Amino acid sequence: MASAKVTSSNIQQENRSFREEQNYLSQLSPCCWQIKKGFVPNMRVEGRVYVNDALHSLMFDELKAFSSSKGVGGFLPALKQVANVAALPGIVGHSVGLPDIHAGYGFAIGNMAAFDMDDPEAVVSPGGVGFDINCGVRLLRTNLDLKDVDPLKEQLAQSLFDHIPVGVGSKGVVPMTAAELEEALEMGMDWSLREGYAWPEDKEHCEEYGRMLQADPAKVSTRAKKRGLPQLGTLGAGNHYAEIQVVEEIFDKHAANKMGITRKGQICVMIHSGSRGLGHQVATDALTAMADAMKRDGIQVNDRQLACARISSEEGQNYLQAMAAAANYAWVNRSTMTFLARQAFAKQFKTTAETLDMHVIYDVSHNIAKVEKHWIDGKLKTLLVHRKGSTRAFPPHHPLIPVDYQLIGQPVLVGGTMGTCSYVLTGTEKGFRDTFGSTCHGAGRAQSRAKSRRSLDYQEVLANLNRKGIAIRVASPKLVQEEAPESYKDVSEVVDTCHAAGISRKAIKLRPIAVIKG
């Protein structure tokens, strides 16, 4: 289908009935759907979306509503976004949608795509990373059991709430000067280690070892730094949280043992946060710069939200270096909150974090673009892999995962919604082949924040958590309905889809007993 000669604005797409749209979709397996070329203009590769029977109706209902409205108003459906990404220059393999997929800015959240760095036309798109650069999850284990913590969970929840600043306008408790921020942006967790906020072994169990070496603080704007300076060591709001969790089920005993999880009832701590206002500003700055680059280089996209630049261009390189600095900030942020969580537990149990065995199991990124080696058509290629709302899931024996996880594969941390279970998965060879070593990152929204605010009562949401025996501390109670379990897909169905598709394996199920939110 020929496209109009457009660069930074939307390419006009044909209005089709839902029945006509379905002609471009076919089920390849119980958990995988194909998006054929022609679903949107200019597709260079096909799309692949992983959903099971319990999840696929949400995806199709969204497309049906879009077709009925003839594309007027609202978000593009996630299926259309996956297909629009498949039309970007330099994409290889497939544009992949994971089971937690839902509409986002440019890329759907839960969409990953890889671009050939040897192709001079290949692009990098901030929409493929997201505004919260290196939003991610960290999991700590302890040697405590439910019987140790349950009588104290209200006090522990309060202690965590007192130690970790939360909420939209929260400010960090770690003193930091502008010069120290520059160092943190460049050094990532090496800065945390030097300043005494991290243990040496924390780095070993962190994606990229907590530091992207291509980071250049000079490429981060003054406005971004001003936003980030007071926020280091803060949780933020939205879907970010700190949770005290209990091991409810162990699916893979060997993998769990390697992670230090030896029994049901063992207590863990999960921290979910990102790069706060600094990362958001980095993305905003890049989108502005790339709009001009697209006009200059004649880059055509189906959706103006897919603003992008050639990877090799000045704008592309500036973004990748600033994004890496924001990613380093996020790792420092989670390291600082780890330090504060260890303090809270040590204070409550009148001992040390070391005595409580509060080691990092792993730290994963959900919103990031990274240079990786993958096989394409029998050739080893250097690719820029965009993962937005998706998690790296490398297989056993991959050189980029820690020594102690070499036999089981990289741990994958899948955070649940407020009051629901979370999971630990491991990467697989099939996932490395089929999805560039990527899997789901969480539950994925089932309805918009605005609809959640209209349809749910925050007091009832809090009462439901209380009935489940979950201690909760929130900075903004009226915002909790946005994050209620009813607003999200069933995380167990999401995880089961990835497991059934073979792109990752279930290892551990965790249940929250205390939730801290902004």
Image: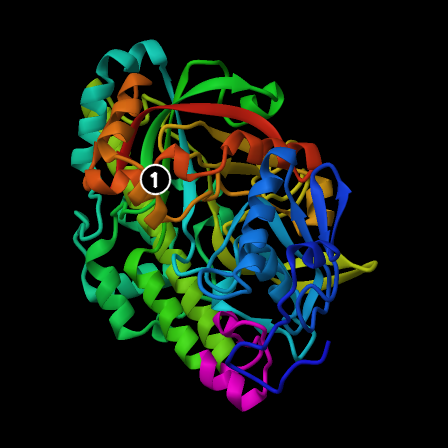
Q: Residue at x 75, y 59 (%)?
A: 36
The N terminus: image quadrant: bottom right
Give x and y (percent) for residue 407.
Answer: 66, 32
Residue lying farthest to the right in this orientation:
378
Tag 1 residue:
483
Side of 267 where 39 appears, left or right: right
Q: Residues within 10 Å of mark 1 (few under 14, many from 20)?
A: many
At mark 1, the secondary structure is helix
Give x and y (percent) for residue 176.
Answer: 19, 57
Q: Residue at x 49, y 66 (%)?
A: 72
Q: Quadrant of residue 201?
A: top left
Above or below: residue 346 compared with residue 127: above
Above or below: residue 23 compared with residue 3: above
| Magenta highlight on residue 307 | yes
Q: Quadrant of residue 118?
A: bottom right
Would you say residue 307 is visible in this rendering?
yes
Give the magenta range.
Answer: 290-314
Would you say residue 111 is visible in this rendering?
no
Give x and y (percent) for residue 428.
Answer: 68, 38
